């Protein structure tokens, strides 16, 4: 997947990215606040924009993308590191 030129995250993307700000290493959640899986489209679009990056493989659920926030992701939500 190539990086797209996207100026700002959508509301859903921003909500997901902001949750990584409070986690060690910027880990992004697999589930939203209601316990539903974060839509794969949200995850993939943030990966494509460079706001998130794959982090570790999940041996229990290899189809889940475990990601972390990037420096560009922090900038996209208005937080410099």
Image (cartoon, rainbow, N blue to C red):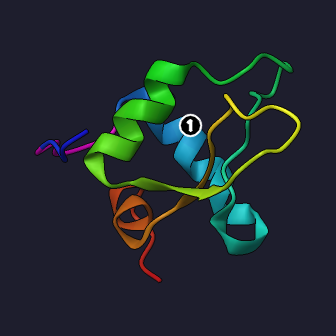
The residue at the point 47 percent across, 56 percent down is 53
Q: Position of residue 43 (x, y in %)?
A: 50, 33
Which residues are the magenta region?
5-9
Queried whether the magenta region covers residue 45, the answer comes back as no
Identify the image quadrant of residue 47.
top left
- Tag 1 secondary structure: helix
Q: Position of residue 58 (x, y in %)?
A: 78, 45
* Left or right of residue 11, residue 76 in this image: left
Identify the image quadrant of residue 44.
top left
The residue at the point 58 percent across, 39 percent down is 16
Badge 1 local density, few (<14 within 10 Å), some, or many (20+)?
few
Q: Position of residue 31 (x, y in %)?
A: 77, 29
Foreground pick, 63 / 20:
63
Q: Is residue 58 above or below residue 31?
A: below
The residue at the point 54 percent across, 48 percent down is 17
- Tag 1 residue: 15
The residue at the point 26 percent across, 38 percent down is 1
Q: How many marks?
A: 1
């Amino acid at each position: 997947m190539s990086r797209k030129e996207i100026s700002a995250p959508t509301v859903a993307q921003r909500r997901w990215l902001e949750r990584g700000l409070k986690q060690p290493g910027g880990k992004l959640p697999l589930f939203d606040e209601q316990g539903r899986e974060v839509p794969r489209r949200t995850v993939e679009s943030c990966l494509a924009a460079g706001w998130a990056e794959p982090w570790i493989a999940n041996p229990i659920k290899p189809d889940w993308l475990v990601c972390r926030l990037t420096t560009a992701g922090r900038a996209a939500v208005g937080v410099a590191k």
